[in-house]
Image (cartoon, rainbow, N blue to C red):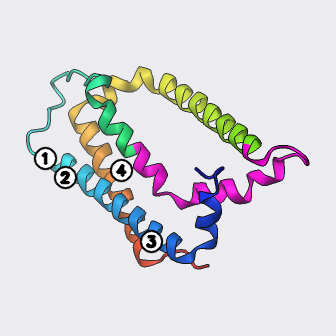
Amino acid sequence: MVALGLGALLALSGTLNTILQYAGAAYLLWLGLGMVRAALKSGAPSDAASPALPSASSRSGNWFMKSLLTNLLNPKMGVFYVSFLPQFIPAGASVLGFRLLLAALHAALSMVWFALLILGSRPLRHWFARGAVARWLDGLTGGVLIALGLRIAFHPAQR
């Protein structure tokens, strides 16, 4: 979307950027509150039980939408593509085509990085899935997301 000019519009429009910042802050608060609520939920599995990990297919739609919203409500990535990547476009090259190539390269590198993170953390997955550990991580992560959402909401970036 940035390669098609949306990032430039975002970089130039202070109002659109502010709206996107507040929408992102609200989304962070919503995610954080949901995680804290899940951490405090009283019927969570105990440490003694070895919970079965949910299948990826049962969660994929939910996580896909959360990931999509997280990326769409993050104006910093759009500004990154508008301000940083153009310096790598050679003179005479198709701007749209080369931007799409750079975005695809960035996406491919990100996929490799996240695959390595997944493989590296795989031996610890059962420990992470233990009830107390999962609740603690959800509470901690939710608290951080709430703090970031409040920070963005009450101290938006100045232009």
Please report the bounds of the magenta region as a residue range. Answer: 67-96
**Identity of the amino acid at label 3?**
Ile
- Residue 159 occupies which quadrant of the picture? bottom right
State if disc 2 and disc 1 touch (CB < 8 Å): yes
Q: Earlier in the sequence, mark 4 or mark 2?
A: 2
Q: Which residue is mark 2?
A: 37
Q: Which residue is mark 1?
A: 41
Rounded to the nearest angstrom, the CA distance separating label 4 from label 2 is 12 Å
Label 4: how many Cα within 10 Å (few below 14, some 14–19, many 20+): some
Which residue is under mark 3? 19
Mark with earlier residue (3, 2): 3
Q: Which mark is residue 141?
A: 4
Query: Does residue 99 lie above or below 113 as drawn?
Result: below
Q: Position of residue 36 (x, y in %)?
A: 24, 53
Upstream in sequence: badge 1 or badge 3: 3
Mark 2, Cα crowd under 10 Å, few <14 / some 14-19 / many 20+, is: some
* In this rendering, position of residue 39 left or right of residue 142: left
Residue at 26%, 49% in the rendered image = 35
- Residue farthest toward the right in the current orientation of the protein: 91
Horizontal placement of 77 versus 74: left or right?
right
CA gap, disc 1 and disc 2: 6 Å
